[in-house]
Amino acid sequence: ATRAFQAIRIAVNGELDVLRSVLPQAVHALAPGGRLAVISFHSLEDRMVKRCFREAAAQARAPSKAEVAAGLAFERERDEEWAALLGEDLPPMRLVNRKARAPSKGESEDNRRARSAKLRVIERAELT
């Protein structure tokens, strides 16, 4: 029953639509050296955050067309949905942790609601 009510709450509140619109805004608002940390509590949220952060970090290290043509690099497959939402003028970003961080066993035992939480962090590169 808990999952059914969670699905109803997500749909009624438009939570995924809000997340889809807020993530690109938050990424663009980061100051140089700033970090954006997002805690998600279910797989749909986590998948959206992961795709957004990966696309943002990948745009910063995308090879040039000359490198690809010379065989020095491969063109990566882009996440078209998030590429469009993030736009082309994105400053350099890097993933702080490659995989989502989950709560420790002790933390999950102390706080049952924390057991499904996942933390993802992205950082805007410093200006040089």
Image (tube, rainbow, N blue to C red):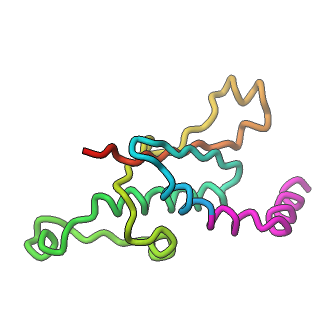
What residue span does the magenta drawing correspond to?
1-21
Point 30% across, 69% down: residue: 76
Left or right: 62 with respect to 107?
left
Point 28% across, 58% down: residue: 61
Point 85% across, 68% down: residue: 12
What percent of the width, then of the height, locates residue 38?
Answer: 60, 47
- SS majority, magenta: helix
Camera-nearest residue between 90 and 31: 31
Location of residue 43 (image quadrant): bottom right
What percent of the width, then of the height, locates residue 112?
Answer: 79, 34
Q: Residue furthest left?
A: 70
What percent of the width, then of the height, locates residue 2?
Answer: 88, 53
Location of residue 69 (image quadrant): bottom left
Camera-nearest residue between 39 and 107: 39
The C terminus: image quadrant: top left
Left or right: 49 with respect to 89?
right
Task: Establish if 1 lies above or below 14.
Answer: above
> Does the magenta portion include 123?
no
Task: Establish if 75 lies above or below 125.
Answer: below
> Does the magenta portion include 20?
yes
Left or right: 93 with respect to 121?
left
Task: Establish if 122 lies above or below 66.
Answer: above
Point 69% across, 26% down: residue: 107
Camera-nearest residue between 36 and 79: 36
The N terminus: image quadrant: bottom right
Task: Please give the count of numbered marks on the rendered protein.
Answer: 0
Left or right: 5 with respect to 111?
right
What percent of the width, then of the height, locates residue 13?
Answer: 82, 65
